[in-house]
Amino acid sequence: MKVNDKMEIVNCSKDDFDKIITDITDFWGSNRTLHLHHPLLIHEFQDTAYVIKDGRTICAYLFGFYSQAEPIAYAHLLAVRNNYRRLGLARKLYEHFIECARKKHCLKIKAITKPTNQDSIGFHKSIGMKLIGNETIDGINVVRDYSGPGEHRVVFIKDI
Ligand SMILES: CC(C)(COP(=O)(O)OP(=O)(O)OC[C@H]1O[C@@H](n2cnc3c(N)ncnc32)[C@H](O)[C@@H]1OP(=O)(O)O)[C@@H](O)C(=O)NCCC(=O)NCCS
């Protein structure tokens, strides 16, 4: 696959969201994150729900929102369709979200991932995000119990 000029970032429509749900395994390798794809992400947070399309195919998406507690832009879900990876699409989505977040006076961008998700850890480190965990599991900094008992998470943050 190749990136072309027509592959712009647009806000995610309901139709796009439904296509993502239908093809969830092409983005994640399984449907393990289905429960995280709540429709409120596009009904109430469409401003910060972005997709990149190649013709009618959705190749990548980022669903985020602005924290109500702190001036932080939170990237909740980021995924690139399996055969569109390593083309810079995830980086492009992040750059766009950061640009929008600065206009909303956010000072930081944040994301979390499971300690086993090497793709995600590799990607987030590559864009200069710092791991803020103060415990180490298998050599990776994590925040213990971040997502509930026994649910440790890698927490990434970066000034924007
Ligand atoms: C993580 C993910 C979003 C990266 O998307 P991508 O479009 O392939 O990433 P990019 O092409 O923008 O990569 C930018 C840089 O990140 C790093 N990177 C990306 N994927 C990586 C991987 N699997 N391992 C290590 N580093 C990686 C590289 O430095 C890369 O630059 P390079 O290709 O010039 O070496 C993608 O692998 C994915 O969708 N995975 C499944 C869903 C998922 O786990 N999402 C993250 C949940 S928080």
Image: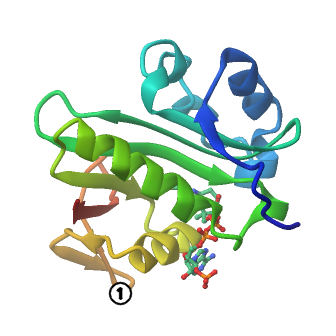
The local crowd at label 1, few if under 14, some if 14 to 19, many if 20 or more residues have their Cα within 10 Å, is few
**In the displayed structure, does residue 80 sit left or right of residue 39?**
right
Pick whichever, 149 or 36, lies toward us. Answer: 36
| Residue bearing the label numbered 1 | 139
In which quadrant of this rendering is ligand 1 seen? bottom right
Pinpoint residue 8: horizontal percent, then vertical percent: 67, 46
Pick whichever, 115 or 148, lies toward us. Answer: 115
Q: Quadrant of the C terminus?
A: bottom left
In the current view of this chain or complex, which residue is farthest to the top?
43
Question: In which quadrant of the rendered view does residue 50 lie?
Answer: top right
Compared with 45, 63 (above or below) is below
Q: Quadrant of the N terminus?
A: bottom right
Residue drawn at x 62%, y 28% is 12
Pinpoint residue 140: horizontal percent, then vertical percent: 35, 80
Residue drawn at x 30%, y 63% is 156
Q: Is residue 148 visible?
A: no
